[in-house]
Structure formats: structure tokens, C-alpha cells
Image (spheres, helix red, strand yellow):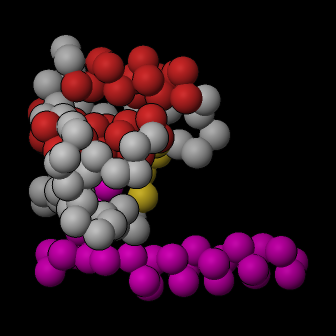
Amino acid sequence: MPILWKRTMLALLILSIAPRKSDGELEQWCIADEQTPDDELQIALDWACGKGGADCSKIQVNQPCYLPNTVRDHASYAFNNYFQKFKHKGGSCYFKGAAIITELDPSHSSCQYEFHP
């Protein structure tokens, strides 16, 4: 019983700190899954920035989301851009299992991740 109680309390804590819009909707971003190998992330990143239609201009050299220059960081930005752009048109945050949803804003320094309600 103590494990169930701990899990319940953790779930309530996460729900209580997750940002909400005024209409009660949770804010969600799509990021690269930490467990996905870089080669799989690169394939998904290439698709997102190509046929997927994500705007990947901000992860180019000298742009606000170029640094840190890692496949994982660039994939997270591209996945989120795709997800925000297409989530209301049937797009998902799946990328063949390479991505996950987070309620914590992944923006950092000058790199702002979009969120569209």
C-alpha cells in the first residue's frame, strides 16, 4: 500500500505544478526521448525538418536554438515545432517512439519552444 500511496502523491504533485491554460488545458511540448539512440533521433529529425514540414530554421548555425549542438537538442526542437504545428490536424508526438510529451517547458536561454493551445 505505501508504494501505491507514493505513486498517487507523485501524480498529484505533477498535476498541481503542470502549467494550465485558463480553460484547464495542460500545456504540452514534444521532446526527444532520452532513451532513444542518436542514430534513430537523426532519422526522425531529418523527417521532421523535411517531409514532416517542421520549421527548423532556429536550429541552424547562429540561430537561437542551435546550441547546444546535439542531435537530441535539435530533435527536441524539431519534434516540438512539428507537434505544435500539426497536433490539431492529426499530427502526433510519436516519431516511431523517439519522442515523448512533457508538461515542463523545455525552453532554455534564448531558445523558446512554441506552445499553441
- Which is nearer the eye, 102 or 7? 102
Asked if residue 81 can be seen in this view, the reply is no
Answer with the quarter of the image where residue 61 lies: top left
Look at the image and give the residue range highlighted in magenta: 1-30
**Residue under the image location 54 percent in, 81 percent down:** 12
Question: Quick one: which residue is furthest to the top in this view?
Answer: 51
**Quadrant of the rendered image containing residue 36:** top right
On screen, residue 114 versus residue 2, left or right, reads left
Toward the right, the furthest residue is 1
Q: Residue at x 65, y 83 (%)?
A: 9
When the figure is inspected, residue 50 is found, relative to residue 59, above or below; the finding is: above
Q: Position of residue 22 (x, y in %)?
A: 14, 80
User: Residue 115: within the magenta?
Assistant: no
Query: Quarter holding the C terminus?
Result: bottom left
Q: Is residue 16 above or below residue 105?
A: below
Left or right placement of residue 87 versus residue 108 in this view = left
- Looking at this view, is 7 or 99 the one in front? 99
Q: Quadrant of the N terminus?
A: bottom right
Q: Is residue 109 above or below residue 79?
A: below
Residue 39: % across, % down: 54, 21
- Residue 90: image x %, image y %? 20, 31
> Going 19% across and 46% down the picture, which residue do you hit?
62
Q: Is residue 2 inside the magenta stretch?
A: yes
Q: Is residue 66 visible?
A: yes
Q: Based on the displayed image, in which of its 4 quarters is residue 89 positioned?
A: top left
* Viewer-nearest residue: 36 or 13: 36
Q: Is residue 90 left or right of residue 43?
A: left
